[in-house]
Image: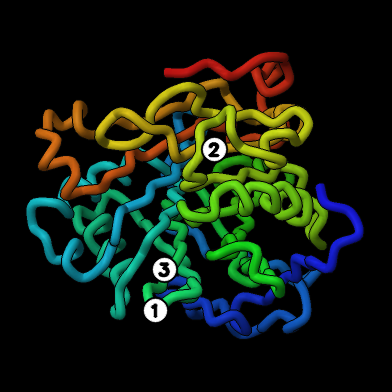
Amino acid sequence: MKKNTSLLFVIIALLGGGYFFKEPLQALLKNLPAANGLPTTNTTWTQPPPPRINSTGTIRIASFNIQVFGESKINNPEVMPIIVDILKNFDVIAIQEIRAQRDVCAELVQMLNADGKYRYSYVVGPRLGRTVSKEQYAYIFDMASVEVDPNQLYTVDDPNRYLHRPPLVGWFRTRGPQPQDAFTFSLVNVHTDPDEVDRELEWLDDVFLAVRDDQRHEDDVIMLGDFNAHNTRLGQLGQLPNLVCVVNNTHTNTRGDKQYDNILFSRVSTTEFSGRGGVFDFLRQYNLSLEQALQVSDHLPVWAEFSIYEGGRPGSIAKGNGNPVQY
């Protein structure tokens, strides 16, 4: 962590930062947070759909860079059924590289919910970037499994512009257990600039700690996304004490020769981790050719499984030493 620098990671309230909430979240926007920070009271969780029993006692959190996810891809009838089927494997998905003038996330969620089996929703951030090519982050989530507090989503403001696309941070809670027993966690959605990876990795450790120490005091911070870096080359971010990398020495690109994506958290704080996680290789899962798979994305989703209960189960891998098991 840097000392005595002018960089301040300032929390921006979601509405002031230009974020968009869609049905069924719009009714929850009556009490807007203060523009200079997160609210500390009046938490407003998203309203639950009809209950669905979680028989496994776990949720799966994923990250997926849907390469240049825009109007061309959302209108592709060969690609979108694959993307929809991929996302249905997970309860929460952090999405990177959304590039569209229209609201493609709304259309994606409509496709996810079309068969009536699920009630996915989403939150999406503003267009970010220093060039004319802007990108958005989003979280897609199954409301039967998790809920988000829309009043406590925020972006990280980087006044010195050390980060090309400042992360989108969301606060989630699992459904099923009593609220006081449910697993709560902060997700930090990241996409580094491939031309500035080394510099950005030197600041993402500060982001991780700033989220941990924000006004919510949430110790379960999960940073996930496209780091454009191998798990052994994470710079100062990789030097955070007790850091777990879910993906270790495994390719995460569709061509099978690079590692870009990961899910990171503290093994001491996040004891809810079940020890299960890895890479969803949709090329082999759906028996696609490389050409077909690259139309979906040049990235593979990465995922990790967590208990729905705060504190997880006794003997969780997150408490132990060494790297988590890969599947």
Q: Which of marks 3 and 2 is nearer the N terminus?
A: 3
- Say which element carries label 3: loop
For residue 26, above or below residue 199: below
- Cα separation between marks 3 and 2: 20 Å
The image shows a total of numbered marks equal to: 3
Judge the density around disc 3: few (<14), some (14-19), many (≥20) Cα neighbours within 10 Å: many
x and y percentages locating residue 138 in the rendered image: 45, 62
Q: Which residue type carries mark 1?
A: Val
Q: Which amino acid does label 2 sit on?
A: Ile
Instruction: Look at discs 1 and 2 and give the one toward the viewer.
Output: 1
**Dot 2 alpha-carbon crowd within 10 angstroms: few under 14, some 14 to 19, many 20 or more:** many
**Marks 1/2: CA–CA distance:** 29 Å
Residue 103's mark?
none
Q: What residue type is labelled 3?
A: Glu
Q: Residue furthest right?
A: 4
Residue 44 visible in the current orientation? no
Q: Name the residue under label 1.
A: 132
At x 67% / y 76%, what residue is drawn? 13
Going 38% across and 60% down the picture, which residue do you hit? 97
Residue named by callout 2: 263
Q: Report x, y in % for residue 83.
A: 23, 49
CB under 8 Å between discs 3 and 2: no
Q: Which residue is the site of mark 3?
A: 135
State the residue at coordinates (47%, 77%).
20
First in sequence: mark 1 vs mark 2: 1
Q: List x then y, in percent, for residue 112.
A: 26, 55
Query: Judging from the image, what secondary structure is the residue with disc 1 in?
Result: loop
